[in-house]
Amino acid sequence: MLPPSDPLARRKRAPALHELADRDWVLFGPDHGLSELVLGVCARAGFTPRRTVQTSQVAGGPPPLAAAGLGVTIVPDNVVPDGLNAEIRGLRPPLARQLVAFSRQDLVAPRAGLPRCAAGAAMGTPTALSAEVIT
C-alpha cells in the first residue's frame, strides 16, 4: 500500500520492492507474525525498511496509517478496508508465503457430558493442507 501522495502511486504498474527502499514504512511489531515476513523480503531486496510507525494490529493498523501518509506498508489484501483512500499495488515479483492449515478429516460430534478436553480429543485425526498465498 502506498499513500496517495507517493509518486509511485501515480503509476499503473506494480513497483519492485527495491523501489520502496527509500520510503518511510508502517511496520508490524516484532511479535507479530507478519513482521518477520516483511523484514525478510525487504532484506532479500537489499534494504532494511525505515520504520516510522509500528503496530501489532493488522486491519486497524497499517492500512489506515499508510493511507494517512505515514509510510508504505505490505499487508494481505484481505485486510484492506473498502473505501480506504490509498493506492493498493501488488509487488513485482508478487510476494508469496506458504500457509499450512490443519483440519480434522474424520469429524465426530462430541458426546454430551464429556469434559471440553475429552471432547476435543474425540474429534479425530488432524490432516494438513498447505497453500501458497500471493500478496
Image: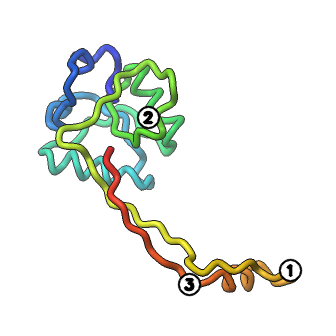
Q: Which residue is mark 3?
A: 125
Work out whether mark 1 precedes mark 2 in sequence or the reverse, and give the earlier one: 2
Work out whether mark 1 precedes mark 3 in sequence or the reverse, and give the earlier one: 1
Q: Residue at x 39, y 61 (%)?
A: 99
Q: Position of residue 46 (x, y in %)?
A: 12, 45
In the displayed orientation, state which residue is furthest to the left: 46
- Residue 92 is left or right of residue 87, and the answer is left
Nearest the viewer among 112 and 46 is 112
Q: Are discs 3 and 2 less than 8 Å apart at CB?
A: no
SS class, disc 1: loop
- Residue 103 is left or right of residue 87, and the answer is right
Q: Position of residue 41 (x, y in %)?
A: 22, 49
Amino acid type at image mark 1: Ala
Work out whether mark 3 precedes mark 2 in sequence or the reverse, and give the earlier one: 2
SS class, disc 3: loop
Q: Residue at x 51, y 26 (%)?
A: 82
Q: Position of residue 106 (x, y in %)?
A: 60, 81
Screen quadrant of the N terminus: top left
Nearest the viewer among 3 and 101 is 101
The CA span between labels 1 and 2 is 44 Å
Q: Which residue is mark 1?
A: 112
Q: Which residue is mark 2?
A: 62
Q: Residue at x 86, y 80 (%)?
A: 112
The figure's colour scheme reads rainbow
